[in-house]
Image (spheres, helix red, strand yellow):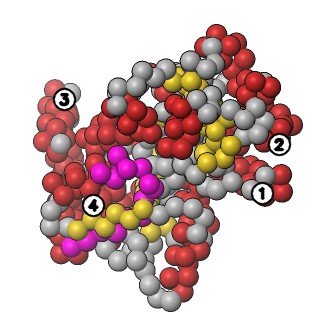
Amino acid sequence: MYDLSRRSLLRAGTAALVAGIAPFGIARAADDWQAEWARTIAAAKKEGAVVVCASSNRSRRDFIIKEWQKAYPEIELSYQVVGGTSFVPATVTERSAGKYLWDVFHNGPPSGLSAIHAGLLDPLIPEFILPEVKDPAVWGGWDKAFYDPEHQYMLGLFSDITAPYYNARKLKPEIAQKLGLKVLLEPEMKGKIYWFDPRVQGPGAPYLALFDHLLGKENLRKILTEQDVVFVANDNEVAAAVVRGRGVIGIANRPGEAFQEYKAAGLDLDIRPFGNGPDAGYRGTGGGTVAVFNKRPHPNAARLFVNWIATRAMGEGLSKAQDLNSARNDVPSLDPRFAAIPGATYLDAQREEYDVLVRQWQQELKTIRPQ
């Protein structure tokens, strides 16, 4: 991937000559980043390891581990799945005992925001070396790309529209299109809605902000208290309920990995999202931000990792591996059903202002839906 960068620099140098401008500054810049990159790789190999805390997406994990082993076999990747609200308090406790165990954060925005508030992360932009990574235009600008209020700690690697989905054999598409998310309030949907438990941090929680925004607080409260919504522990349980007919509507990650086993078994499914417009879904990063811990034990390996995972080549590979659209604007969208509509304004439900709203609803849920 780096030969491409050299050719780009050569083209830039040629253009400068045509314009009568000496390209020495361009050549010097190329030498500078390439030398720094080489030093970082060498130092990372001496460190010999990088420790990453990550979300539970299996396809993402498998792809990252495989590609890292091919790219840097000398550096051990400890890719540890963590989740829930206990990780940050546990890390604070570790550090109070003098244990600094983590290098890279690769998880969802809610945990990342908690880590920022706990003072666990360093700014990320100074870690970028590769020109294709440190260019804000590739990401649509840092304000859009970063999920923290300061726009410097937590970069979203993916940008996807997540909406509830339904079994089109149980709910007529014309009704779903006519009513949209208001169908959640229909008497016929009582007991037929399966929701990745929004009371915990995970893909079900941002829907609290989305439904509050689109349907209003009272309607959301009716859904939670009157529609006999079934809370389940993971995407697979939501998918199984919808496929087998116990549920009609699934509120979870968008239909993808959780349905692969059914498709592989030859089942004829007709599972559809409610749409990809602002009236149906929220824009998020699929549990895929990247950040660096402060006082990290392997600083050079961490720097190598965050540059590597943010490249175009990894963006394309990860996008295909887990069927999520990359946040890089030079990586084509995989599925237009889950791509943002140009010019549309979406609820960014995983950003801090909405994370606060989600946590308020989670507090209320302890009272209205304790079990």
Location of the C terminus by quadrant is: bottom right
The boundaries of the magenta stretch are: 48-62
Would you say 190 lies left or right of 98 here?
right
Q: Is residue 256 placed above or below 175 in the rendered structure?
A: below
Which amino acid does the dot numbered 2 rest on? Thr
The numbered mark at residue 15 is 3
Which x, y percent locates residue 105? 44, 62
Which x, y percent locates residue 128? 34, 55
Marks 1/4: CA–CA distance: 44 Å
C-beta proximity under 8 Å, tags 4 and 2: no
Marks 4/2: CA–CA distance: 48 Å
The numbered mark, 3 or 2, whose residue comes first in the sequence reads 3
Closer to the camera, 152 or 108?
Answer: 108
Quadrant hosting residue 138: top left
Q: Secondary structure at mark 2?
A: helix
Q: Which residue is mark 1?
A: 370
Q: Secondary structure at mark 4?
A: helix
The numbered mark, 4 or 2, whose residue comes first in the sequence reads 2
Marks 2/1: CA–CA distance: 11 Å
Q: Which residue is mark 2?
A: 225
Closer to the camera, 232 or 287?
Answer: 232
Which one is closest to the eye, mark 4 or mark 2? Answer: 2
Which amino acid does the dot numbered 1 rest on? Pro
The numbered mark, 2 or 1, whose residue comes first in the sequence reads 2
The numbered mark, 1 or 4, whose residue comes first in the sequence reads 4
Closer to the camera, 257 or 1?
Answer: 257
Q: Which residue is mark 4?
A: 304
Which x, y percent locates residue 242? 56, 32
Which amino acid does the dot numbered 3 rest on? Ala
Q: Secondary structure at mark 3?
A: helix
Which x, y percent locates residue 171? 63, 19
